[in-house]
């Protein structure tokens, strides 16, 4: 364990107990076992952080093993995306493994089980099997094929492997106990016929192992000491152990399955099937849409690996499922970006501000700090001129004493620049303000050291020089779902809660230092929030995604509702 003192979670306690009971520290080995049938989401991020975090704490190897036993749903694209996500989060696996690496060994073990009378080929339909399986309070009924001879089972199983039968005509089942109180122990399926191309083995196999048969045995082959999975696999533990009992060599490490609770995130879904549905039906632009709960979506939105790891560490490991407010994740993002994101100026809802007493044609390049959190402050130059853009909400023609931004007859400071005073407005035929006229105090430039520059005014607003402004497409994201638990009511389709206002696209105006920003660059638009350059950016057009606001405004909206 790491030398720093901390209270152990229940999983660490399990490991510590095993070490006390004689498990050698050098026998510790963990794994992260995703199925490559979709992109990873925030739930997987917690599991990644758990397993790889244990590896770091105990100086133990962690395997990345792809559970690629269902070629009907798996693709190389997903394998590549998963590897990218794990590395982006800051982790490196000891070995890259695949359940398909072990297909031959699993087959050989299965043949041995058939010979021992512990597995048989069943030729019932799935409907017939479902009827004879019983209920939690009523024992199942033996399959009419349960007592096939060993010879017949071996012959049928080999012919299944050779592709002689159509899908659904036969399956292979373990012969355990049709009266077990654990429904999963009632002769579970070990193999099914699938005539599908496999992304690694091609057409070699026509039969594929089920998760319960492949998983524990893969753990054993890799000598994984602790196999951690989510709570829905708790009933599977008995079967996990039964399968290991059939093949275990007492001289080797026996894997131990233990379960932890899912940490579901509010206003999202984390079912890969439902995320795929959102993609296929066009509710989002793809797996990496910044509104998605996928790691790739969060990366594109501008979330940082550190923030996600901190979030996983903050919510911890529990024994009961829980719904975590997405605001906590956003807090972790905000906290990290506050330390690292350069401050820049951008105006997203512009109105023109004209300084009537500023010389025509003059421009200045003023110093602006990059990030107040830096140990050694660095600066950049921003252009200043007679005509500026400011945020429309930063001006009120008539305002009360609590409004500390620009209004007529009162002073406000322009960030990094001058103190100005509102004088008059110009309106269009509909009464909308098109221009604000103000005067500036020439002696009040920030940092000049003059007496006027040290004069205190109550408000400071940001701005962008009109002549130098860089237009950009700004994508403002809101919650993808309006309900905190869109998947919580099984009688209501989760898509009923899709938020129609989850994306707003506007044109903003940025200071010219952002001209050279590239995909993935993150910034704080001062007074507005954190933003990230999107991959849709081209040489001719900047595109920014809003990552998160400077504070949690959603909580205020929800409290009003």
Image (spheres, rainbow, N blue to C red):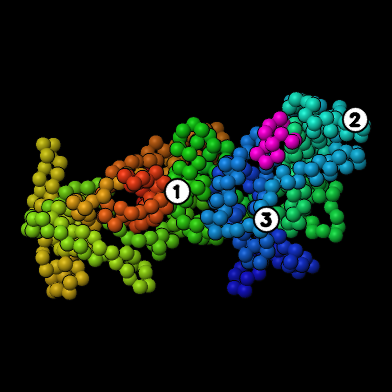
Query: Residue 315 at x, y = what percent?
Result: 54, 57
At 14% from the left and 44% from the top, the residue drawn is: 434
- Disc 3 and disc 1: Cα gap in Å? 28 Å
Tell which residue pokes out farthest to the front in this image. 539
Q: Is residue 454 above or below residue 15?
A: below
Residue at label 1? 300
Residue at label 3? 95
Q: Earlier in the sequence, mark 2 or mark 1?
A: 2
Q: Is residue 177 left or right of residue 396?
A: right
Q: Is residue 92 above or below residue 236?
A: below
Q: Under tag 3, what secondary structure?
A: loop
200 is within the stretch colored magenta = yes
Q: Is residue 185 above or below residue 87?
A: above
Query: Residue 350 at x, y = what percent?
Result: 22, 47
At 13% from the left and 36% from the top, the residue drawn is: 430
Q: Earlier in the sequence, mark 3 or mark 1?
A: 3
**Quadrant for the C terminus in the image:** top left
- Foreground mark, 3 or 1, reads 3
Residue at label 2? 152
Q: Report the span colored magenta.
A: 194-205
């Amino acid at each position: 364990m790491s030398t720093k003192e901390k209270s152990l979670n229940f999983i660490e306690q399990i490991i510590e107990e095993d070490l006390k009971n004689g498990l050698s520290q050098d026998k510790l080995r963990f794994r992260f076992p995703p199925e490559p049938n979709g992109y990873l989401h925030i739930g997987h991020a917690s599991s990644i952080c758990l397993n790889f975090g244990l590896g770091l704490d105990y100086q133990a190897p962690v395997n990345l093993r792809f559970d690629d036993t269902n070629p009907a749903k798996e693709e190389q694209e997903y394998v590549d995306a998963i590897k990218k996500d794990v590395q982006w989060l800051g982790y490196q696996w000891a070995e890259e493994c695949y359940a398909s690496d072990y297909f031959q060994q699993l087959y050989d073990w299965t043949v041995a089980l058939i010979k021992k009378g512990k597995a048989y080929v069943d030729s019932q339909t799935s409907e017939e099997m479902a009827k004879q399986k019983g209920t939690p309070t009523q024992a199942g009924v033996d399959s009419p094929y349960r007592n096939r001879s060993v010879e017949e089972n071996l012959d049928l199983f080999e012919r299944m492997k050779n592709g002689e039968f159509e899908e659904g005509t036969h399956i292979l089942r373990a012969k355990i106990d049709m009266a077990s109180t654990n429904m999963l122990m009632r002769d579970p399926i070990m193999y099914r016929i699938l005539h599908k191309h496999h992304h690694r083995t091609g057409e070699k196999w026509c039969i594929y192992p089920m998760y319960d048969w492949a998983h524990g045995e893969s753990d054993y082959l890799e000598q994984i000491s602790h196999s951690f999975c989510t709570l829905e696999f708790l009933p599977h533990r008995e079967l996990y152990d039964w399968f290991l009992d059939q093949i275990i060599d007492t001289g080797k490490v026996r894997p131990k399955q233990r379960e932890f609770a899912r940490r579901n995130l509010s206003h999202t879904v984390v079912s890969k099937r439902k995320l795929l549905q959102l993609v296929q039906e066009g509710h989002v632009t793809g797996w990496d849409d910044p509104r998605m709960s996928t790691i790739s979506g969060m990366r594109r939105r501008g979330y940082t690996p550190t923030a996600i790891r901190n979030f996983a560490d903050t919510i911890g490991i529990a024994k009961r499922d829980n719904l975590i407010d997405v605001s906590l994740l956003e807090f972790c993002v905000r906290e990290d970006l506050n330390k690292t994101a350069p401050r820049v100026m951008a105006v997203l809802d512009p109105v023109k501000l004209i300084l009537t007493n500023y010389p025509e044609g003059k421009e200045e390049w003023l110093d602006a700090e990059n990030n107040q959190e830096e140990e050694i402050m660095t600066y950049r130059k921003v252009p200043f001129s007679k005509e500026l853009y400011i945020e429309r909400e930063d001006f009120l023609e008539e305002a009360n004493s609590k409004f500390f931004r620009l209004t007529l007859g009162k002073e406000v400071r322009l960030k990094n620049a001058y103190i100005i005073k509102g004088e008059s407005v110009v309106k269009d035929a509909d009464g909308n303000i098109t221009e604000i006229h103000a005067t500036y105090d020439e002696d009040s430039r920030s940092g000049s050291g003059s007496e006027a520059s040290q004069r205190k005014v109550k408000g400071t607003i940001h701005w962008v020089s009109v002549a130098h402004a860089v237009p950009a497409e700004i994508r403002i994201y809101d919650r993808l779902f309006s309900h905190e638990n869109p998947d919580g009511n099984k009688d209501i389709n989760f898509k009923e809660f899709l938020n129609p206002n989850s994306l707003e696209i506007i044109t903003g105006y940025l200071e010219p230092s952002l001209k050279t920003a590239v995909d993935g660059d993150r910034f704080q638009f001062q007074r507005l929030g954190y933003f990230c350059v999107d991959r849709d950016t081209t040489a001719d057009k900047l595109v920014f995604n809003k990552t998160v606001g400077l504070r949690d405004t959603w909580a205020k909206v929800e409290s009003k509702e």
